[in-house]
Image: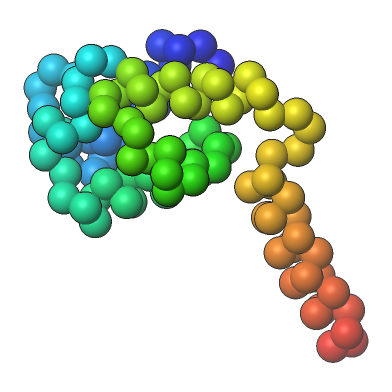
Amino acid sequence: MTRDEMFSGLVSLLRQNRCRLETIGTGTSIQALGLDSVRLTACLMELEELFKVLVPDQEWGKWNTLGDILDYIEEYLAHSVGINPIDIDLVGRRLDEGDTEKDSQ
């Protein structure tokens, strides 16, 4: 995925969460988005799901601009090896659900 594709996905996610800025660029500050803490938290969760990344709380606090978010995503994806922890968690849940079905038969 290119940086432009990641940026488009990020802008789409922000628009879905009521960001009404007409012009959004990589230099746009997170504060300028005008999202309350609930919307920002929702965006973070959706961002993790959309890009298959995990964002520790201390990392989120370091971001000032949308460019910072893209830098983190690029860095994360460049250094992740094999199965992403999010995928492992989903597989684990499916296996647990499957085991429950077997036990009930």
Query: Which residue is rendered at x = 19% and y = 21% of the image?
Result: 28
Q: Nearer the viewer, residue 7 or 73?
A: 73
Tell how many labels. Answer: 0
Colour convention: rainbow
- Indicate whether 3 appears above or below 14: above
Position in image of residue 16 (x %, y %): 26, 40
Q: Is residue 63 visible?
A: yes
Q: Is residue 90 left or right of residue 39?
A: right
Q: Nearer the viewer, residue 76 or 25?
A: 76
Position in image of residue 8 (x %, y %): 36, 20
Residue at far bottom of view: 104
Q: Is residue 1 left or right of residue 24?
A: right
Q: Nearer the viewer, residue 16 or 44?
A: 44
Q: Is residue 46 left or right of residue 40?
A: right
Position in image of residue 68 (x %, y %): 36, 23
Q: Is residue 8 visible?
A: no
The image quadrant that residue 65 belongs to is top left
- Indicate whether 86 appears above or below 52: below
Query: Which residue is rendered at x = 33% and y = 18% of the image?
Result: 67
| Quarter of the rendering occupied by the N terminus | top right
Query: Which residue is rendered at x = 85% and y = 74% of the image?
Result: 99
Query: Which residue is rendered at x = 49% and y = 26% of the image?
Result: 73
Q: Nearer the viewer, residue 77 or 9?
A: 77
Position in image of residue 105 (x %, y %): 89, 86
The image quadrant that residue 15 belongs to is top left
